[in-house]
Amino acid sequence: MNIPQPTMPVLTSLSKEQVEQIRKKYHGNWSFLGEPDAEHDASRQGWFDDLFINAPEFNQAIEGKASLVIGRKGSGKSALRIAASERIRLHITDRRRLEITASADDLLDAHTAISKALGARAATREGTVQAWQRTFIYLILRELAHSLSGRAVTAKADTAIRKWALAKNVVGLDWGEWVIETAKNSLPRVAQALKALPTHALTEETIAQAVASIGFVISIDDFDNLYTSDHKLAGIRAVQAAIEAADRMSRSRDFSYITLYIREDLWSLIGQDWHYLDKVSSYLLLQWNQDQLKNWIEQRLKRSVAEALNYKSSDIKTPFEPLWECFFPSSITLDNGLVSSGFLYLLRKTMYTPRDLQKLLKTAAETSGRWPVPADSIPKAEERYASELIQFLSNEYSTLCQGLNVCINSFSAKPLEWIPSKLFKHLRGLIESGQVTLAPGAVLGQTDEVALARFLFRIGFLEIRIPENDRYEVRDGVRFPEQWRGIRRDDAIRWAVRSAFYRYLRSHADKSKFFE
């Protein structure tokens, strides 16, 4: 007789004892919100069901219908790639499908070799696109050759691909091939018999047949490293050609696709003077809003509470506020005396990405050393977080703006708000002194000081405040990534350093240098 097991009821509220139990479990443990990189985070059991946010806006990438996924670092590009891979495995078809993941360095090596083989043709715009198409085909053939290892190969195309891969040292001999090779070298009769067999060359026709007979999914997660690396592959033009090649190959097949994951700022740069821009058929701008980020942190709080109380995550039906208040302050009093929601206050300090929100919350926890994080420890956490974030901006965008750390440092003893004319004068002084220089691709046809202001807006350092009666309507590059294209320059509006950085900069106003 089967005795039914008791089931835990859903949890709709938290008692005082349960809150204490939760806080005790995570005392001194600031990593319960997950890992900063999706590769490690996704290894946690139940990640796809309990932690991954399957927002409808992101389905285009998860379902493999985006040849280009664009987002800031930490916005979830890797998580989308992993989720797409999960979906492929869950919805596998009878046809053969190859799942290929390549690094930027791997892609660079293959592209360099193929460009040399194409010679002068690769120097033209169309030739560069062709070189990238051949690079992607090379990845397909290499993976196909690996998948044929250990199988009895009979098809003409498969035989040719396997022989090509062995000759080029793309793959090693499998057991059967090793036996044949050994016999051929040891027994003259075997060698003579093998010579009599027909050979299959890897012709263009054979390659076309092989690629047409399979499905392929190619994901390049760190694709933008092609531009930021020392090689730079002729810079923007090479990135444009690679995207065009991937888009063409994806559009021509309904069973296969290539997805490139690219930094948001690089996407803004490559849109200039690019004839193919309006033809890119399927790209996704990975941008998080307030509700999505609240949902993201709520899922992680539910998971943590469930583990502490021995529940399933799906059984935690407690509202967001009690979950949040287990760990963080419910409200924070602003400098002007107004009271803000604790979650919204901290969110506004971030760059509106999951990784950034996660980092600020961990910093707040580490700074206070206890649960819940007291509101009066938040300012210290802000300063520490801002110092790391400023360093990140300096490292991330230094290839586009030489002297960016000097530029950011120059605001340390300055006011929070600026009228445009004074801001441009300040930035012009930095440029004319030679301390700050924008890369050609970042200028975008503007005067130097305006281009620099727009650049600082785009990376999330500056914001624009538009007066509306007794308040400001705030625009910043992290929530409004396209706003920089039509930035106002008249003195009726205000520019300001984002509050995420201002407190830290003011704390160093008495120091001439805090970046060395």
Image: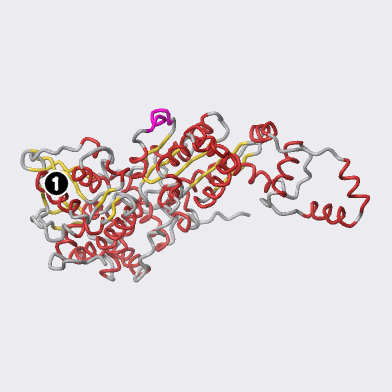
Q: On the rendered image, what quadrant is the N terminus found in?
A: bottom right
Q: Which residue is mark 1?
A: 424
Task: Residue at the far front: name it.
Answer: 120
Q: On the rendered image, what quadrant is the C terminus found in?
A: bottom left
The quadrant holding residue 134 is top right
Answer left or right for 118 relative to 300.
Answer: right
* Percent position of residue 198, x then y: 83, 38
Of residues 150 and 422, the one nearer the viewer is: 422
* Percent position of residue 165, x then y: 69, 47
Q: Can the viewer see residue 91 in this picture?
A: no
Answer left or right for 151 relative to 489.
Answer: right
Residue 28 vertical placement versus 458 (above, below): below
The quadrant holding residue 195 is top right
Of residues 402 and 412, the one nearer the viewer is: 402
Task: Residue at the far right: name it.
Answer: 189
> Dot 1: what SS?
helix
The colour scheme applied to this rendered structure is: secondary structure
Tally the marks: 1
- The magenta span reads 274-280
* Percent position of residue 470, x then y: 6, 42
Of residues 255 and 156, the one nearer the viewer is: 156
Q: Can the viewer see residue 195 in this picture?
A: yes
Residue 337 vertical placement versus 93 (above, below): below
Task: Residue at the far left: name it.
Answer: 470
Answer left or right for 109 relative to 427.
Answer: right
* Percent position of residue 10, x then y: 40, 52
Q: Does 231 appear in magenta?
A: no
Q: Amino acid at mark 1?
A: Phe
